[in-house]
Image (cartoon, grey):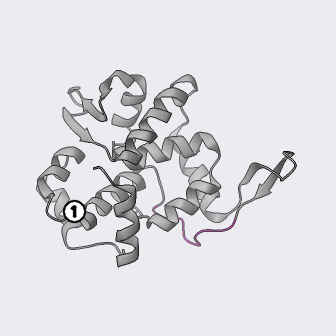
């Protein structure tokens, strides 16, 4: 199954449909580009790897290679919120995360909101996409890579190093902007400010 690449507008709408816990997790996944099965949760267990707006991943044989992960301003904010909140809660399994993404995309999520009188109520969210195939935790790593390539075509080696990719894997992004329009690239550039 091919992973989906999100447009900035899709990410914004999807985020609004998620409950707060998943908003924090997926926002951090998007902005760090860490591999969801290993690096991301290792980082959650080791928030000390984050320092001065950068994540310093150490080498863990067979699991992750050492690298420095650059973050945008939005990425730094997402990581700081993640560190303050998520480490206090249990991890959600991979299946739970995928199910939460699919429910949010299909608009079958009830989200608590407050009305104008401050009264809490559950509201349904709008449908964002009809086809959720390829929508998973890995979507966020691939989306960040596609956005970086589209926004910063001259920073190939910086992107390679930060994402921990080899040239062969990276080549699938260089000539394919995954249907991102100029408007999408402009919106992505705002989200990646400071990268």
Labels in figure, total = 1
Q: Which of these two is toward me, 195 or 145?
A: 195
- Magenta part of the chain: 126-134
> Which residue is found at the position 59% from the left and 73% from the top?
130
Residue 53 against residue 136 in the figure, above or below? above
Residue 124 left/right relative to 99: right
Instruction: Provide the secondary structure element on which disc 1 rests.
Output: loop
Q: Which of these two is toward me, 100 or 69?
A: 69
> Which residue is found at the position 40% from the left and 72% from the top?
184
> Which residue is found at the position 45% from the left and 49% from the top?
137
Report which quarter residue 69 is drawn in: top left
Q: Which residue is mark 1?
A: 152
10 Å neighbourhood of mark 1: few (<14), some, or many (≥20)? some
User: Residue 32 at x, y = what percent?
Assistant: 35, 44
Residue 80 against residue 187 in the figure, above or below? above
Residue 185 against residue 103 in the figure, above or below? below
User: Residue 143 at x, y = what percent?
Assistant: 37, 59
User: Residue 151 at x, y = what percent?
Assistant: 27, 65
- Residue 143 appearing in the image: yes
User: Residue 186 at x, y = what percent?
Assistant: 36, 69
Say if the magenta span includes residue 145. no
Residue 38 left/right relative to 108: left
- Residue 38 appearing in the image: no
> Which residue is found at the position 35% from the left and 77% from the top?
182
Residue 50 left/right relative to 132: left
């Amino acid at each position: 199954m091919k992973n989906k690449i999100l447009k900035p507008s899709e990410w914004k709408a999807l985020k609004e449909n998620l409950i707060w816990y998943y908003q924090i997790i997926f926002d951090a996944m998007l902005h760090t580009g860490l591999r969801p099965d290993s690096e991301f949760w290792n980082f959650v267990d080791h928030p000390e790897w984050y320092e001065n707006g950068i994540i310093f991943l150490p080498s863990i044989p067979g699991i992750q290679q050492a690298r420095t992960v650059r973050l945008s301003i939005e990425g730094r904010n997402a990581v700081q919120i993640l560190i303050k909140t998520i480490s206090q809660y249990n991890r959600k399994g991979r299946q739970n995360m995928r199910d939460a993404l699919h429910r949010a995309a299909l608009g079958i999520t009830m989200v608590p909101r407050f009305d104008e009188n401050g009264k809490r109520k559950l509201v349904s969210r709008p449908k964002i996409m009809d086809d959720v195939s390829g929508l998973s935790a890995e979507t966020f790593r691939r989306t960040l890579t596609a956005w970086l390539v589209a926004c910063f075509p001259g920073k190939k080696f910086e992107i390679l190093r930060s994402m921990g990719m080899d040239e062969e894997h990276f080549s699938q992004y260089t000539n394919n902007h995954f249907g991102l329009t100029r408007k999408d690239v402009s919106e992505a550039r705002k989200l990646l400010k400071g990268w």
